Amino acid sequence: MDKYNNQYFILSSSCALTKGASRTLIQDFQRSNADFVPNDYYDLCNLLNRHKVSDIANEIEDGSLASYYQFVDFMIEREYAFISDNLQTFPEISQDSYEDENHIYDAIIDIDENDIKKEKLERFLTDLKKLHCTDLQVRIYNHSNVDKLHSILKEVCDHIFYYVELHLDSSEHITYKYCCDIILNYPSITNIYLYNAASCTSKDYNENTEGCYPLKMGTVYYVAAELNNNNCGCISDYSKVYRNAGFYKMSQVHNSCLYKKVSLDKDGNVRNCPSMFEKYDLSEGLEKITKSPAFRKYWNITKKDIEDCKDCEFRFNCLDCRAHTKGSGIFNKPITCRYNPFIAKEE
């Protein structure tokens, strides 16, 4: 086709292809597009990228040229790729390995409202800030006392985290207005999850000022399940991350769930996450604990190491659970995942 003569095929910098056992996932993080193509096109795309369309066409058998140009048209129409006369105008993006400057990125705190470990909570929060943690999930069990809840939230928000997510174990006596008041009075808290709800749904909280567009302050999520560590690590379309190029890049070299994560359980012990078996004494200091080889042994387990997952086209979009797996091995597939990459279906 004359329209592509002497023009270079360039894969968009916001686009990534992941080859699985039976098909390839193409996704564009910037435009939120995603498609599946046969694996042969994964190899073709790598061959084409940053080469002249006509030069690669010369290596294609005559009977396959129509399909070849159809694929080129598809990639350009979907904006996964573009063509250019000058390759130097679009220099290749560096593929340096991912590294996050924060020592700890996110943390989970489990609190029993009937037995709050105040001193350990305060120390844990103080140590988190020293380690530049930005995101925090607070899960409160046996919630019934408003004053105790506000005392906890004040302690948490006084340490000024960028994002705080609140999980409460019962929705029975908690009103939507009650949650909105929390979001309004504690700016770090954006999302609230209420468990044991009749059904799974959500409701945004917007502040409406006359003459202005509504300002979204946060969201209240109702979850038809118990707040329980055994519900951790669920693999589903909801848990997959499609729009975050940083997450995709990180997942190729680090564990997508446990890398730079730490938690404090209800008894005041430190764990990789609340569902993990190993626990550490906070008196050792959070920095010392999180720098130890024993604590970090999960950080660099990627989906490329996991049984079945290593052959899955979703492997760099998926949160990886090392707590609940099929079998006792450290590299076993997450127990909640029913997807079979060899047939591209759930079982």
Image: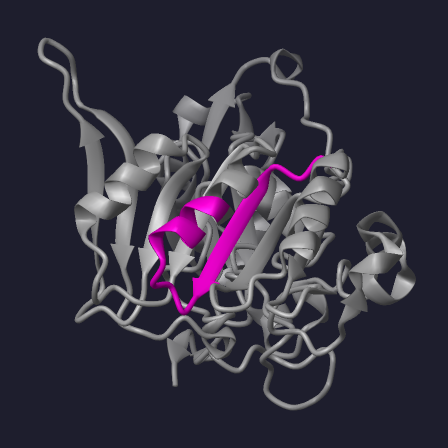
Residue 158, given in percent of the width and then of the height, sits at 56, 33
Q: Residue at x 58, y 57 (%)?
A: 109
Q: Is residue 330 above or below residue 305?
A: below
Q: Residue at x 25, y 40 (%)?
A: 180
Horizontal side of 147 relative to 230 (left or right) equals left
Instruction: Say which quadrant the N terminus sits in.
Output: top left
> Which quadrant holds residue 282?
bottom right
Horizontal side of 341 relative to 227 (left or right) equals right
Horizontal side of 193 relative to 11 (left or right) equals left
Q: Residue at x 68, y 64 (%)?
A: 268
Q: Is residue 60 visible?
A: no
Residue 204, given in percent of the width and then of the height, sits at 21, 41
Q: Is residue 340 above or below residue 319?
A: below
Q: Give the extent of the magenta segment.
A: 132-151
Horizontal side of 71 relative to 215 (left or right) equals right
Q: Is residue 111 visible?
A: yes
Residue 214, given in percent of the width and then of the height, sits at 17, 23
Instruction: Say which quadrant the C terminus sits in.
Output: bottom left
Q: Is residue 140 above or below residue 340?
A: above
Report the colour scheme: one colour
> Which quadrant holds residue 333?
bottom right
Viewer-nearest residue: 123 or 236? 123
The extreme left residue here reads: 210
Q: Is residue 322 magenta?
A: no
Viewer-nearest residue: 68 or 253? 253
